[in-house]
Amino acid sequence: MSFGRAISYFVREALVGLVRGWKTGLLAVITIALSLFLAGVFLLVAENLRALVAAWRAESRIMVYLSPQASEADLVRIQTLIEAVPWVRSARAVSADEAGARFLAAFPSMADLLEGWDRSPLPTSLAVEADWSLAGTDGVGLATQAWRQDAAVASIDDDRDWLAQLETIAVVLRGLATLVGGVLIITAVFTIASVIRLAAHQHRDEIAVLRLVGATEFFIRGPFYAEGMIQGVLGAVVALAALATSFVLLRQRFGDGLLGRLVAGRFLSPGVIAGLVLLGAVAGLVGAVVSLGRERVDGMRAAAGWGPAE
Amino acid sequence: MIELFHVTKRYPGGQIGLSDITLGIARGQMCFLTGASGAGKSTFLKMIYREEVPSAGQILVNGRNLAALPAKKIPYLRRTIGVVFQEFRLIARKTVFENVSYLPKVLGMDAARQRRLSYETLRKVGLAHRINAFPLSLSGGERQRVAIARALINEPEILLADEPTGNLDPSLSEEILQLLLEVNLRGTTVIVATHDRALIERVGHRVLTLDHGRLAQDQELAPGVVPSMAGRMVTASDETPVSGTGRDAGSKAIVEEHR
């Protein structure tokens, strides 16, 4: 039998098997769909968080806060010092009043914090924007360290510190996706293995006849391998459909807000989608291979009445 | 064609299946294997289609040493051997056609060729008209004929039948026996395991008697008292050793008589 004809036969037999044993097959599909769905959720959030952090990083800046005693001359001197750094695009002065106005715009419910002061309690600052790609990690660190040495500088706040923390969270989420997805995939593999084993047990009489007439192991096992792979692919398709539906609903619900951008900013890339489908297929195949170990098939032969003779 | 040299089969636990069997069965021979339950008849057959391997000794089938046959070569051996069992081993959820066409499917024949070959083979066993029936709707004799058709579809060199009439009443047993004799007349080596001594005596041919795994007797019997399909008695003869292979007057006489 040619390879192409064999594959066609395997798929045909597998589809017939799936239709006949649709209840157990459904269990396997749901298990793998659940595994891939949860892994997909983690991947989706991690991917969106990564994209969000990348966008924020592009817009990030360093705030250099001056001490209350700093004079106008100090402000100009420090501004000149900062703007002399090659990767700094600008160092714009933010007066105490402007900072107060910003605070009130951002947190109107906390306006009372600014009341009762002779002058704005917020310090004068310099908002430093830069071309971060030219700066390099060490360059920024060295520059901010030098600025801190100036007596007129009270503190320096680098946006990129908390962006780095968000990036760490994204990495953790990606790791969780791998871990949770991995554990669930292993569970799904064993579920598929059980389902395939059950299907093989139900067909043990036919397997015995196939062996008797001279079918090869490849011919006997092929339909079961195909059945496992089809279950895996169906599980992946169901998971992706559920993910896409959730994505659309969340996008409608949260729009372009932070939460919306975090969970529904953009959908999984075609590469990740293909990867999930492939993962489903491989999980199904592995489940089928695990279920049809040599000793188990021999056991089926014995169960079909082909055991030791009289 | 089939040669056994000091073949012994011991099962785990020490049970003896066969003990030091040495014999040869020529191409085209009709041969009965008899003995009480547990004598080793089924083990003998299983050795030939390599379901079992000997614990000691060698089995050659068409010059191939089965004990040394790699597992991946076993399917190719089995395509040259048809096997029939007492309990038919048909798949109830499959039609007669599907039951018969397993091997053509394995060989990669297209659907039309599978159908044609199955029809031809079923016609030879007189069941072409039941090609779309399911096994449970057939009589015992018809089921056994389907099993024989499945075994014969690739025109095997050897046909092994393990108690093929064990589940059938006498008249159906005669039908099946006649069919096996016809298969033998077409040149196939046929080995029938049966404990039905009367059936063997009616037909004659070579008879191998096993007793607790040992070959107790190897003799050629002339056809004995052969009842016709209608119950008419034909000839009478006691166990008389004869010479020659099984493809002799014995099977021809039986077949002719049944026609």
Image: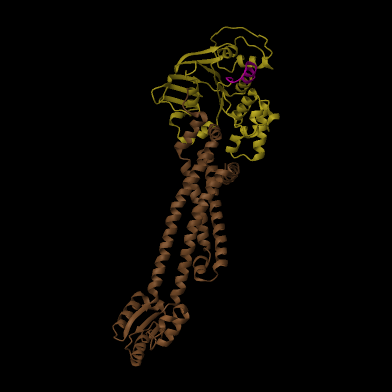
Can the viewer see residue A288?
Answer: no
> What range of the chain is rendered magenta?
B165-176
The quarter in which the C terminus of chain B is drawn is top right
- Residue at (52, 66) in percent of width and height: A264
Q: A151 or B60, which is in the foreground? A: A151
Where A166 falls versus A284 (above or below)? below
Residue B6 % position (x, y): 42, 21
Q: A159 or A284, which is in the foreground? A: A159
Where B20 falls versus B52 (above or below)? above
Residue B50 % position (x, y): 48, 29
Q: B78 or A41, which is in the foreground? A: A41
Q: Quadrant of residue A117?
A: bottom left
- Residue at (64, 29) in percent of width and height: B136
User: Which chain corresponds to the colour brown?
Assistant: A
Where A149 falls versus A11 (above or below)? below
Can the viewer see residue A307?
Answer: yes
Where B78 falls versus A181 (above or below)? above
Q: B243 or A70, which is in the foreground? A: A70
In the rendered image, the residue lying farthest to the right is B129
Q: How many marks?
A: 0
Residue A127 % position (x, y): 40, 83
Q: What's the image's color scheme?
A: by chain
The reply to whether the magenta stretch includes residue B125 is no
User: Which chain corresponds to the colour yellow?
Assistant: B
Residue A152 % position (x, y): 31, 86
In the rendered image, the residue lying farthest to the bottom is A73
- Residue at (52, 59) in percent of width and height: A273
